[in-house]
Amino acid sequence: MLSHGKLRLGVNIDHVATVRNARGSAYPDPVRAAKLAEEAGADGITAHLREDRRHISDNDIERLVDALRVPLNFEMAATDEMQAIALRHKPHAVCIVPEKREERTTEGGLEVAREENRLAHFIAPLREAGSRVSIFIAADQRQIDAAHRIGAQVIELHTGSYCDFHAEGRFEERDAELERMREMSAYAHSLGLEVHAGHGITYDTVQPIAAFPEVMELNIGHFIIGEAIFRGLHPAIAEMRRLMDAARADT
């Protein structure tokens, strides 16, 4: 039987940078937020350096690499530019995500199966440099199989549809998506892949995902940063941590 180990929490600090960039100022500082998240019990920090630099900047990444004691999960598109940056900094983990210029945020999982050969060659140098390679995908067996074949060590399941269905009151569809994620978490684990999950997770939606024994890490950002406006960053993270731990303990 699978052991229920401690579920890690990665805090995404992208949207601290979004607020900073709205005024073109030096504050609020996402690196300061990352350090506060460390103090609050985050197990890792996630930052997405987008092609258009709409939030996190190159300088943010350099400062995060220097400042953090916990692992940095560097989210990136599969481009030559981002590969070069990742190879220069050698973060603990790189998570390959889809990226479209016009989207507000990452809208879905990466299409791995159609680009298997290109992605296999793309991630090989990252693995050789010592970074753990994660692929951000939908809960779909075809994509999981492809991620496994190209040599990814980790998959991160896109939880956005599940969270959207919950927010919209579409509970039958929510429950069906949750069951699909449950099945695919177990399937990916059976292949030897480490399973993470993230996107759109809130206090109301975290516990069913946290209860999956195969899921080892949740990456949560926008909701925590938004909640921090009202609670403060430390209490916002502490409450997410409490809910995650309670869900794990109850299974």
Image (spheres, helix red, strand yellow):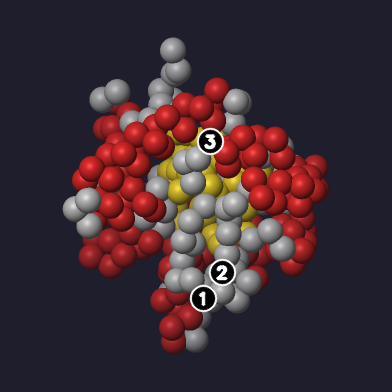
In the image as oriented, which residue stretches furthest toward the top? Answer: 1
**What residue sits right under mark 2 in the picture?**
100
Q: Amino acid at mark 3?
A: Gln
Which residue is denoted by mark 1 in the rendering? 102
Quick check: 251 left or right of 35? left
Circle 1: residue type: Glu
Please tell me the numbered disc located at residue 149.
none
167 vs 8, left or right, is left
Q: Which residue shows up at 59% across the image and 31% down it?
A: 193
Mark 1 in CB contact with mark 2 (< 8 angstroms): yes
Disc 1: CA contacts within 10 A as few (<14), some (14-19) or many (>=20): few
Q: Position of residue 54 (x, y in %)?
A: 53, 76
The amino acid sitting under disc 2 is: Lys
Q: Which residue is mark 3?
A: 141
Residue situated in front as seen by the camera: 126 or 57:
126
The local secondary structure at tag 3 comes to helix
Residue nearer the viewer, 184 or 225:
184
* Residue 67 can be seen in this image: no
Q: What whole-number distance in Å separates the C-alpha atoms at marks 1 and 3?
A: 28 Å
Give the CA separation, mark 2 to mark 3. Answer: 24 Å
* x, y percent for residue 87: 77, 55
The first of marks 1 and 3 along the sequence is 1
Image mark count: 3
